[in-house]
Amino acid sequence: MGRLDGKVAIVTGGAQGQGAGIARAYVAEGARIVIADVAKDEGQALADQLGPDAHFVQHDVSDAASWTAVVEDVNTRFGPVSILANNAGILRFGDIERQGADEVELLWRINQLGCFLGMQAVTRTMRKNGGGSIINASSVEGLAGMAGCTAYAATKWAIRGMTKCAAMELGPKGIRVNSVHPGMIDTPMTRVHGGDAAMEFGASKVPLRRVGHPEDIAPLYVFLGSDESAYINGAEIAVDGGVTSTHAFGG
C-alpha cells in the first residue's frame, strides 16, 4: 500500500479489462486517477466503485482536442498528472488480402495515433513539474509476428518504436517512457474473438499453460508508475507467461 502516494494518473481504456485492473491497482496504492474511456456506463460505474480518488471522463484517444480537455481536467481536479497509462487499444484480426483500409485506419487511429497524442498531451505538465512516467501498451505482437495480425501488429511495433524515441527525447526532462507487452489476456476485448475456446487454445500455447488476467498486468503498471522504477527508461517488458521466450503465438 502507498507505493503511488501523491501520484496523479490518467488510465486510458480504463473502463474494463486491463485498464480497469490498472485503475483498481493505482487507487489501492494511493494514486488519484482519471479513468478515460469511450465506454461511459462501465467507466462511470468503476469510478463510483473506487470512490473519491477516481473520476471518469468520456474520452476519444484519437482526438487531440479530447486529450487537451482530459489533461486540463486532471490538472484542475487532482493536480498535475504524473503518470500516463496509455492503455487504450483495439484488436482486429484480418488477412492481408481481405482486410479493409477502413479497419486498418481505425487500428492506426486508436492504437498508434492515440498513444502518440497521449504522450504529447501530458509532456508539458510533466516537464513543468519535474518529470513523470508514461507507460505505453504494446503487445507480444509488438515483439514478434503472428498470421492474421499484420495491421494490428503494425500499430504495436510502432508503439514500441515510439516508446524508444520518446524515452530518448523526454528522458532529459525527467520523463520516463516504457512499453508493456502483454500476451493473451482474458478480457472482453480478447473474448469476443472466440470466447472460452480461444482462451483454452491460447493457454495451450503458453509455457505456463494459462492465459493471463488483468491482475497479472496491473502490478507492472504500478511498478513503472512508482519511484521504484526511477532508473528504467525506454524498456520493453513482456508479460506473457513465457510465449516470447522463443516464438510468438504463430511460431
Image (cartoon, rainbow, N blue to C red):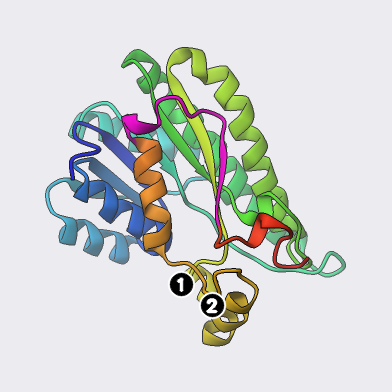
Q: Is residue 199 left or right of residue 230?
A: right
Which residue extends farthest left? 52
Depth check, front residue: 113 or 168: 168
- Residue at numbered disc 1: 188
Under tag 1, what secondary structure?
Answer: helix
- Work out whether residue 208 can be spotted: yes
Measured as percent of width and height from the top left, residue 30 is found at: 18, 42
Measured as percent of width and height from the top left, residue 75 is found at: 26, 29
Position of residue 74 relative to residue 94, above or below, is above
Tag count: 2
The reply to whether the C-beta atoms of the residues labelled 2 and 1 are less than 8 Å apart is yes
- Residue at numbered disc 2: 192
The magenta span reads: 226-239
Q: Is residue 76 left or right of residue 84?
A: left
Depth check, front residue: 34 or 173: 173
Instruction: Name the residue at 62% across, 30% down.
Output: 164
Which residue extends farthest right? 97
Query: In the picture, which quadrant includes the N terminus?
Result: top left
